Image (spheres, rainbow, N blue to C red):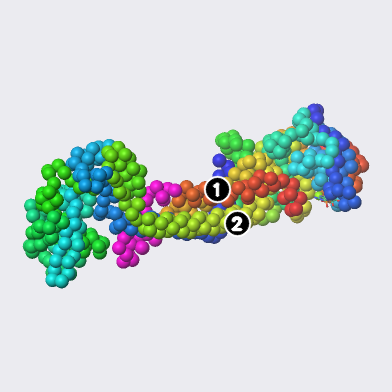
Amino acid sequence: MLSFRIAARFLKSSPGQSALIIAGIAVGIATQIFVGSLITSLQDDLIDSAVGSSPHITLTAADDDATVSGELAAAAAKDEPLISTAVPVRTLSAIFSSGEDSVPLSITGADAAGLDTIYKLSDRLVSGAYRLGEGEALVGAIFADKYGVAEGDTLELLLPSGSIAELEVSGVFDLGQATANERVVFIDAGSAAEALGLADDEYTAVQIQLSDVFASAEVAERLASDNDVEATEWQAENEQLLSGLSAQSGSSTMIQAFVLIAVALGIASTLAISAVQKTRQIGILKAIGMGDAAAGRIFLWQAALLGAGGTLGGIALGYGLIALFGLVPVPFSIRPEPSFIALSAAIGMTVALLSSVIPARSTSRLDPIEVIQNG
Amino acid sequence: MADLLVAEELEKVYGEGEAATYALKGVSFTLEQGEFASIIGQSGSGKSTLLNMIGLLDTPTSGQVLFDGENTTALGRKGRARVRNEGLGFVFQFHYLLPEFSVWENLTMPAQIAGRAITADAKRRALDTLALLGLDGLENKNANQLSGGQKQRVAIGRALMNRPKLILADEPTGNLDTANTAVVYELFRTINKELGTTFLIVTHDRKVAQQTDRILEVLDGELVQDVRNDYAR
Ligand SMILES: Nc1ncnc2c1ncn2[C@@H]1O[C@H](COP(=O)(O)OP(=O)(O)OP(=O)(O)O)[C@@H](O)[C@H]1O
Ligand SMILES: [Mg+2]
């Protein structure tokens, strides 16, 4: 391909200019990759800490006082492939008294293995063991701290029925949220059944996590109508977080767009200058018989070469920036997604090719006589 | 011999209205295959304009050019580019080499544009041409590392490489010293005799014109004289 060889030679004949524009594209693409990956990872982290260890959907009986069966959890998990875990639970409230304070607690009772799939408690223990035998309880770190409760202590709780339940603290967890760490207590399924006066297959709710957290609204709606239950989902209760995230995504997209526009203008102006510099050569090539299309393609190839060099350099530089960011002490790391990198590369190449349209056009229109006559 | 080139009533007007310049005012002549002809005339008489029309580098305002039996005036840009590549060779006062490329690459550029592979045969021909031009051993040098005379000889070599039927030269030795000038015209003659290539050479130098077989004289855009020159042979 002659046009390609000539393009490569033109670029090689002015190495400084070529290197500058490649560096320009690389910085642009690297910025795009870095900003995009940073925001995505930051948001993933925010979402993970918001709902990573709590139910995405909670199913309760349509009728307030009724209960749901354990079957519901199994049926839901079978019907909806997006459900990663569905655990039948028994929730109740209770009051803990400590001197003058009486602390309302929110109690969730379920089997230890099921709870762990939602709350990841075994990874989040501060002290004690992850164990929920008959009459055992796990309490939050703030609660433990504030009221001097530790592993092995006995916890006395006033139940809604008016009776007192005695539980032994088996461990202390840290869910990363202040409210949860102060007010949430996990107990075993049997103790909860007893406290609520429920039979073996009676539960108050089914807690569900999804593999795609943003599918919660549609999955919740389907589950509610298919099973004739009430379904509450996390997005409906976290509108503020979500609008914050979408504002953040919006500004990140805008930054990326402006960076790409700057890159496009850079390539376009460099190619325009190059087209002017090479007018003479193009005229000569046409005089000895090169066609208009082939002459225009020279600049398309130049753009493609610059775009490819700049994009590859940009990806390398982007990964470098991300690695450098890893040295900064923040609570999350940037995980560049291959699909996003591929998208950046595609955008980089497209921008480069598009910005070659004008010089390629003016080149294909050039008449050899313009060069021959003007010496 | 067969007509290689027929110029019919070629007119060229630059500009419009009051500012119009009538560079060619209806020039007609015929070149036969194998001729070695020159165009002379004063500066501004229209020699280059005529040559550029014939060379399909520019289009006439009216009239037509028939080259090798084909009416080139009817051709589009693509067709004209093809004729320039395959049928014509150009030598200008200025060499017009591509400075980014080596001597060898410049020489083979017309063949590359035609999309032809450089066969062993073409390779030998290129080397022969270099030898004929006294450029042996310079093929890998960059075009802008040569002297003015060397560059001009490479440009001549490039014009010859596709073995065109007609070579158009516009003041080909204008930038050369007497010794180099003599070499170039001897070369033209050799090629004309050995390959039967037709030459049309623009010059304002009567002494140069005297060495050609036919002298066309242009004055103010008109062909005023067309003489056979038997002394030259
Ligand atoms: N592009 C142009 N625009 C306007 N007028 C032009 C143009 N090119 C040539 N002319 C005019 O046409 C006439 C013929 O020019 P041409 O270049 O053919 O002369 P020439 O015989 O080659 O002269 P020289 O010996 O100086 O090269 C001149 O009057 C010139 O001014
Ligand atoms: Mg002239």
> Does residue A243 lie above or below B121 as drawn?
below
Any magenta on residue A35? Answer: no
Q: Chain of mark 2?
A: A
Q: Which residue is mark 2?
A: A269
Position in image of residue B205 (x %, y %)? 84, 50
Question: What amino acid type should be assigned to the residue bearing mark 1?
Answer: Leu
Looking at this view, is A182 or A195 the one in front?
A195
Horizontal relation, residue A353 to residue A227: left or right: right
Horizontal relation, residue B60 to residue A81: left or right: right
Q: In terms of image quadrants, where is residue B209?
A: top right
Looking at this view, is A51 or A13 the one in front?
A51
Quadrant housing the N terminus of chain A: top right
Q: How packed is label 1: few (under 14 Cα within 10 Å), some, or many (20 or more)?
A: many
Q: Which residue is mark 1?
A: A353
Looking at this view, is A363 or A27 the one in front?
A27
Q: In terms of image quadrants, where is residue A69?
A: top left
Position in image of residue A54 (x %, y %)? 25, 53
Extreme residue in the bottom direction: A100
Q: Which one is earlier in the sequence, the residue at label 1 or at label 2?
A: 2
Any magenta on residue A328? Answer: yes
Q: Is there any visible trace of residue B207 in the rendered image?
A: no
Q: Chain of mark 1?
A: A
Q: Is there any visible trace of residue B70 in the rendered image?
A: yes
Position in image of residue A188 (x %, y %)? 12, 52
User: Residue, x 63% and y 49% (percent of image)?
Assistant: A358
Extreme residue in the right direction: B224
Q: How far apart in space, not on screen, are marks 1 and 2 (Cα)?
A: 13 Å
Question: What amino acid type should be assigned to the residue bearing mark 2?
Answer: Ser
> SS for tag 1?
helix
> SS for tag 2?
helix
Range covered by the magenta-colored residues = A321-343
